Amino acid sequence: MRVPVLDTNRRPLTPTTPARARLLLKQGKAKPYWNKPGIFCIILTYAVEPDNQPLVVGLDPDSSFEGWSVVGTRETVANGMLEAPKHVKKAIETRRTLRRARRHRKCWRRPARFDNRLSGRRLLPPSTFARWNTRIRILDQLQTILPITDVVVEDVFAVAKKNCRRWNENFSPLEVEKQWFYQAIRDRGLGLHLRAGYERKELRERFGLKKTQQKSKPVFAAHAVDAWVIADDVPGAERPAKQGLYYWTPIRFFRRQLHRLQPAKGGIRKPYGGTRSPGFTRGTLVRHVKHELTYIGGTLKGKMSLPNAVTGGWVTQTAKVEDCMILTRIARRTEWYAGMGRRHSSQAFRPGSPA
C-alpha cells in the first residue's frame, strides 16, 4: 500500500512507499496528516514539481458494505471497505413519532404550510440519499489527497416488474436515482466508467481472484476485490501485491435535541445531544498525552470523553483540554487490516505513520 503525499499547498502528488514516508518524517522534510476517512498522509515541507500518474477509483456499491480501491498504472495505492449508513430510516420514524406526541400534548408548533417550497419536486428517500451522499463524501476526501482522474462503478441493474409502478420506482436503494450519483461524479471533472456485474465476474476470474461468501468479514476478498478488478480494467495494473485494507465505520453523533425520548426521575425531560465539547467539534481527532490517538466525544462538568480512534470504545471520560493535541476532524473510525482479517495491534498505526 502507498502513502498519499501533499505538496506545500496541499495539492495531491503521486503516493510514496511507507519506508520513504518514514524517512521524510524522520528527516523533517514532511509532517503527518490525517484526513476525514482517517487515511494517513504526509505534507511535504519543501517545494517539488508534480509528476503524477493517473489513479483510478473502483467502487463496488452494496446495501450493507461497500468495496473501494485506488489503482495506478503500476500498483495498488489503497483498498477500503465501508459500512453503509443504516440508521437513517429509523431516525426519521422516531422524529415523526416525537412530533406527533408533541401535537397530542398540545405543545406549540408552527402553522401548517400547504404551499411547501418542495412541493412537486422528486426527492430521494432519506435513507437512499444518505448512502449515495456517503459515497460522494468519500470520493471528495480521496480526491483531496490523491490525483484521481477516473472512477469505475459497478452499474447496479435489476429487472423491473410489469404493471407494478410502485415496485419499479422503489425496488432497490442501489438502483433508485443512481443517475444522480453518476452526474455528481462527472461534475467533479472525473471520467466515469460503468461495469456490469457479469464483467466484474469475468475480470475476477481473469486475475484468478476469489470472493468470499462472508460479506461482513473485513478482508480484501469480501468487497474490495470487486472494486480492484473493475478499477484495474482502466489503467491495466498488475495483480494486487498486498491485500490490506482500511475498514471505515461511520461515527454517529446526535445533534442537539429538545429533550430525551423518555422522562427522567421526577418526570423531567433532560436536554440531549450536541455537536460541541468544550469549544471543539465532536469527532475531532486528537493525540492525548496518555491515550495516544483518540477523538472527542461528549462532555460533562468541563471534562471530555475520548473514544478510541479505532474501536470506538471509551478510553477516558475525564480528559482535560490541555492534555490533547488537535489533529484534524474525522467522520469515520478507521481500522487497518493487514490481510486475512488481521487487525494491526497498534491503535496509532497507519501505513507509513510513525509508530
Image (cartoon, grey):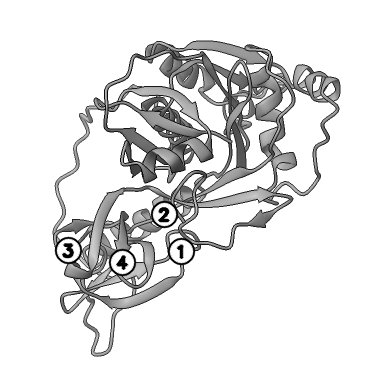
Question: Of circles 2 and 3, which is in front?
Answer: 2
Discs 3, 4 touching: Cβ within 8 Å = no
Residue 312: image tag: 1
Q: Can residue 296 be seen in this view?
A: no
Position of residue 278 relative to residue 219, above or below, is below
Q: How crowded is mark 3: few (under 14 residues within 10 Å), some or many (20 or more)?
A: few
Question: Of circles 4 and 1, which is in front?
Answer: 4
Amino acid type, residue under disc 2 in the picture: Ile
Quadrant housing the N terminus: top right
Amino acid type, residue under disc 1 in the picture: Gly
Q: Name the residue under label 3.
A: 107
Separation of marks 2 and 1 at Cα, in angstroms: 8 Å
Separation of marks 4 and 1 at Cα, in angstroms: 15 Å
Residue 274 image point, x, y percent: 23, 60
Secondary element at image label 2:
loop
Say which label, 2 or 3, has the lower sequence index. 3
Amino acid type, residue under disc 3 in the picture: Cys
Separation of marks 2 and 4 at Cα, in angstroms: 19 Å
Q: Name the residue under label 2.
A: 251
Classify residue 241 as left or right of residue 3.
right
Out of 19 and 78, give the one closest to the viewer. Answer: 19
Say which label, 2 or 1, has the lower sequence index. 2
Residue 187 image point, x, y percent: 38, 13
Out of 183 and 326, give the one closest to the viewer. Answer: 326
Separation of marks 1 and 3 at Cα, in angstroms: 38 Å
Secondary element at image label 3:
loop
Question: Of circles 2 and 1, which is in front?
Answer: 1
Position of residue 40 relative to residue 74, above or below, is below
Q: Mark 4 points at which residue?
A: 288
Amino acid type, residue under disc 4 in the picture: His
